[in-house]
Image (cartoon, rainbow, N blue to C red):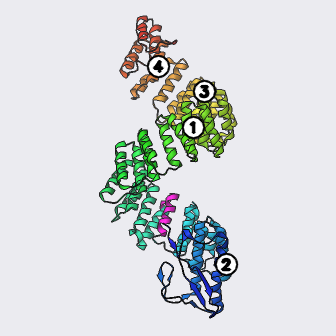
Amino acid sequence: MATATWVPISCTFNPVTDKPRLYHGSVQVHHFPFSNLNFINHIDSSLGCFRKCKQQKLKTLVTKDDCTFFENEQVNHGIDIEQFESIYYASMLQECVRRKSVREGKQIHAQVIKYLEEADVFLGTSLLNMYAKCGSLVDARQVFDKMPERSIVSWTAMLTAYIQNGYWEDSLKLMGSMHDADIMPDQFTLPSLLRVCASMRDPIQGKMLHGMAIKTGFVSDVYVDSALVDMYAKCNLLMDARRVFDKISEPNVVSWTAIIRSYVQNKYHEEAINLFSQMQWSCTRADAFTLNSVLTACANLEDLQKGKQVHVYIIKSLPDINVWVGNALITMYSKSGETEYAFKVFERMSKRNVVSWTAMIAGYGQNGCNEEAVELFKEMHFANVKPNSFTFDSVLAACFSLKYLRFGKQVHAQVWKNGLTSDSFVESALVNLYAKCGHMEDAHNVFDQGPKNDAVLLSTVITGYVEYGYDTEALNVLNKMRLSLMNITHLNFSSILKACACVGSLNRGKEIHAQALKTGLDLHLFVGTSLIDMYSKCGNIDDALKMFNEMPAQNIVSWNAMIAGCIRNGLCKQALNFFRQMQIEGIKPDEFTFASILGACASLAAFELGKQVHVCVIKGGYESDGPVQNTIDIMYAKVRFIHNSYKMFDKLPEQNVVS
């Protein structure tokens, strides 16, 4: 329900006595009786009375004893004309805020300048607030700078305007000016200032404000404490956040929500759920914000049981599922693999927004229900809900999995219609879709229309070319790029190096290696393994070995790359040495290791070692793996143990042309 704004309906002069007659009345803000056209005219006619009072040098307007005026306050004394005029203008400015009409607000401002010698602090703050809430921050700052006198409310209004519009640096500068003016923040200003520090991840300023809160005694205010908890948490100082929370004598829902959200943001999900249990024991009723955080924790833990317990609490405590809570429930059930429960929540939501639809579509896609995701996207279209970039990304991923090229092109048309063709994630999804369906020309067209310095898009198109055998085209795309100006990731390097390896382009591979050295990603596990593979496939086994030895850590993939590289270059003995070293270091071989090493045994006719490896294969449970069985068969055949070879051939689950 809207708050009532009490204003004088009109003020006229009695034609007989020539004295002011004030007519009182009250109207609620959302039922203001004036149109845009006569809004200012009304002010002119009413304030004409006040101006005549000034001309007659009247100091007060006499009112009846039984009248009700401004916030239902009983007035039985004279009202100062200057004060009355200021309050009247402020009431009209509040109406401009409701209408979001900066034009009318400027007209009132012009009258203030024309008829008042100087706006008092109250009216100046009202003007500032009007400009700020109508989105005109430049005008708001001009009013603020011209105010001869400023109250803490004025400082807070200007600061809030900056914060709400995301001007964090300007907020910090204003905070410095506030400090220089010896203005101490109050319990309303401190939470706003702490929010700035949280957004800027500035714990130094935050701790200074904490000191001010202690000095002024506002540290015991629950809203200040909650803002302190949030600030410390966002600055990754969770222990400080917890210390502040533990000192709150009677935490309310705001402070409980702040500490629970802090643990979720820092990925301490179990502790967040435990805190929610403590909150219930303290008989503090959770609100939508609390429940959203707890459900996020359950979703990230994929803890279906606790998620269901929270759902039961929601049903008991909330008469209707809030859209935020509903979205969190959909995400929680989807991440736990329970798409049926997620859809039931979705169906029962009285209000849904684009996030609700997107969460459900993404949930279907994450659980392999791609057809359902596509159908729900169609329903979303008929419901006239405008998709966002995340919606398109999710439905295009479903089309990608289903190879729904025709429908994917329809989605592409909607992407154009909604003006999201420049979104890198949507473009990457489109490139993936076209590449998966073998339409590399369409994929390249999407890539050409996108930003040329987008690392995600570059990685996607190169990976698409490489995976579908267009290695030369992948390098051609790469040659057009200026890598030194790009924010290259380890995934970019891996895709590019794979393309170099496939076409045997050693020189280009070395250039990419140099680029990786400059960015410090050469020792990344993915990049290092890709470099080993590239050098070995290009016949440069020495550089492959050097890269392997320089890696700070190796996993099974990098060991496999080195073993396969040695075998590919005819160094089977070295491959066997790597296999032995790998076992000494406790790295467990997988099916790729066994397939490679059995090939080395076959090349060297090393029957005894081959039999030992065969035993390891059986112990590891890889005997039913097709490629492994094929290499065992080849190994026994090459060392003339044809009987063993026939036995292995008979055990093959599928006998193909290779076997």
Q: Which of marks 4 and 3 is nearer the N terminus?
A: 3
Q: Quadrant of residue 322?
A: bottom left
| Label 3 sits on residue | 468
Question: Where 368 falls versus 76 (above or below)?
Answer: above
Q: Residue 640: in sight, yes or no?
A: yes
Q: Is mark 1 on a helix, strand or loop?
A: helix
| Label 4 sits on residue | 595
- Expressed as whole percent of the image width and height from the top left, the position of residue 65 reads 48, 88
Q: Nearer the viewer, mark 4 or mark 3?
A: 3
Q: What stretch is highlighted in magenta?
A: 188-203
How many residues crowd mark 4 within 10 Å: few (<14), some (14–19), many (20+)? many
Question: Where 447 falls versus 50 (above or below)?
Answer: above
For this rendering, which residue is in front, 229 or 323? 323
Question: Where 288 falls versus 359 (above or below)?
Answer: below
Disc 1 marks which amino acid?
Answer: Leu
Disc 4 marks which amino acid?
Answer: Ala
Dominant secondary structure, magenta: helix
Q: Which of marks 3 and 1 is nearer the N terminus?
A: 1
The circle drawn on residue 396 is 1
Q: In which quarter of the image is residue 14?
A: bottom right
Q: Which of marks 1 and 4 is nearer the N terminus?
A: 1
The circle drawn on residue 111 is 2
